[in-house]
Image (spheres, rainbow, N blue to C red):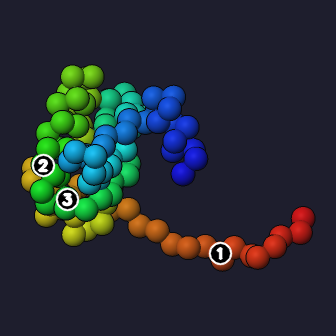
Amino acid sequence: MADVLDKILTTDYQLWVVAEGVDVLGAVVTLVDDTGGIPVSSIYLLGGDGFDDWGHLVWEGIEAWATDIGCEYNEIICRPGFLRKVPGYKHTHVIMGKKLWARKQSSKR
């Protein structure tokens, strides 16, 4: 997580905090990438309690911000069930993973 904090502090990533008074309800980390020539904002990390109560506010804010800075697309990489929680988004890609090896307790090289 130190690398994420470093990127937030250098403004490579953006931190969005959802709070009610002094209570933090959730947080979102975004990033902007234009590798393909089209600026895209991405939801990189998201967590918290009560997402159903505050999630729509986060999407509205992030989408408005992304539009203001010239992004043409917003993407979220998430678990399949999350799709139901973000209206207007559709399933466009599949990301698959496979663990290739187990880390050894100690490695001697």
Q: Secondary structure at mark 3?
A: helix
The residue labelled by disc 2 is: 56
Q: Please, what is the three-letter code of the amino acid marked with disc 1?
A: Trp
Query: Is 94 situated above or below 106?
Result: above
Q: Residue 101: give its label.
A: 1
Mark 3 or mark 1: which comes first in sequence? 3
Whole-number angstrom distance, CA of label 1 to CA of label 2: 39 Å
Residue 81 makes an appearance in the image:
yes
Q: Secondary structure at mark 2?
A: helix
Disc 3: CA contacts within 10 A as few (<14), some (14-19) or many (>=20): some
Q: Please, what is the three-letter code of the amino acid marked with disc 3?
A: Phe
Number of on-image labels: 3
Front in this rendered view, residue 4 or 104: 4
The location of residue 19, given as percent across then percent down, is 24, 46
The answer to whether 74 appears left or right of 32 in the picture is left
Task: Verify CB contact (< 8 Å) between mark 2 and mark 3.
Answer: no
Mark 1 or mark 2: which comes first in sequence? 2
- Name the residue at 37% across, 39% down: 15
Q: Secondary structure at mark 1?
A: loop
Please tell me in which quadrant of the rendered image residue 103 appears: bottom right
The location of residue 13, given as percent across then percent down, is 43, 36
Please tell me in which quadrant of the rendered image residue 83 appears: bottom left
Q: Residue 51: give its label.
A: 3
